[in-house]
Image: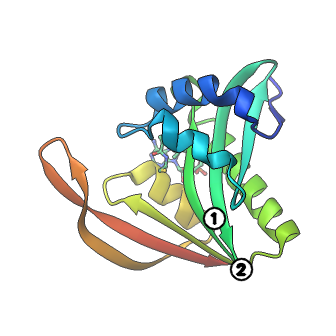
Amino acid sequence: MQPQFRPLTPADLDAMVMLEQSAHAHPWSPALLADAFGERYFTGALWHQNALLGYFIADRVLDESTLMNICVAPAHQGRGLGRQLLENYFAQCRTLGLGWLWLEVRASNRAALSLYASAGFEESGRRRNYYPTADGHEDAVLMQKRL
Ligand SMILES: CC(C)(COP(=O)(O)OP(=O)(O)OC[C@H]1O[C@@H](n2cnc3c(N)ncnc32)[C@H](O)[C@@H]1OP(=O)(O)O)[C@@H](O)C(=O)NCCC(=O)NCCS
């Protein structure tokens, strides 16, 4: 299988909603996903034929960007697609002249924390008890990277 990058368009919203709900324990709502096509956002997505395998959503303000969302379909996780999406994010940031990158991630999300750390993100702080969980709250880990 040779996945290809193709940008997301509003016509892909249904596929995004399905992937979002299958990949995330706490998925974005369809309305929030639809906002990803607003002016301040940019995206990247990996496809195999017409199947959406993964995507990211990021915003941009001045020379900074926040990685808002990244996910890979569960059946395709652990095969390097998340790293490819992150590299595509970095490449788009370079093209757009965005040098400061930020993100927030649940403290329990070991796969994402490991991916981000191995790509050069460093912890810059924490928001205590920021995210709701099934039985309470957990910290948000804030990470930054200078591109
Ligand atoms: C986080 C996520 C995008 C990673 O995508 P992926 O395609 O599975 O990741 P890759 O195969 O590219 O792996 C890249 C790195 O991620 C880390 N990683 C991936 N899965 C992991 C796991 N189960 N446990 C620990 N680290 C893991 C490793 O550092 C890995 O590098 P390595 O292969 O050299 O060890 C994917 O797990 C996912 O979609 N999770 C659900 C959504 C989510 O939590 N998104 C992030 C918060 S918004």
Secondary structure beneath dot 1 equals loop
- Residue 40's place in the image compared with 108, above or below, is below
User: Which is nearer the eye, 76 or 63?
Assistant: 63
Which quadrant of the figure has residue 21?
top left
How far across and down, in percent of the image, does residue 104 sit? 45, 64
Disc 2 target residue: 62
How far across and down, in percent of the image, does residue 37 sit? 69, 46
User: Which is nearer the eye, 75 or 63?
Assistant: 63
Disc 1 target residue: 119
> Dividing the image into 4 quarters, which one contains the C terminus?
bottom right
Q: CA distance from mark 1 to mark 2?
A: 23 Å
How far across and down, in percent of the image, does residue 12 sit? 70, 28
Q: Please state which amino acid type lies under the numbered disc 2.
A: Leu
Bin the neighbour count of mark 1 within 10 Å (Cα to Cα): few under 14, some 14-19, many 20 and up: some
Taking the spot 76% from the left edge, 75% from the top edge, the residue there is 98
In the rendered structure, find residue 64 and report the number of the disc placed on it: none
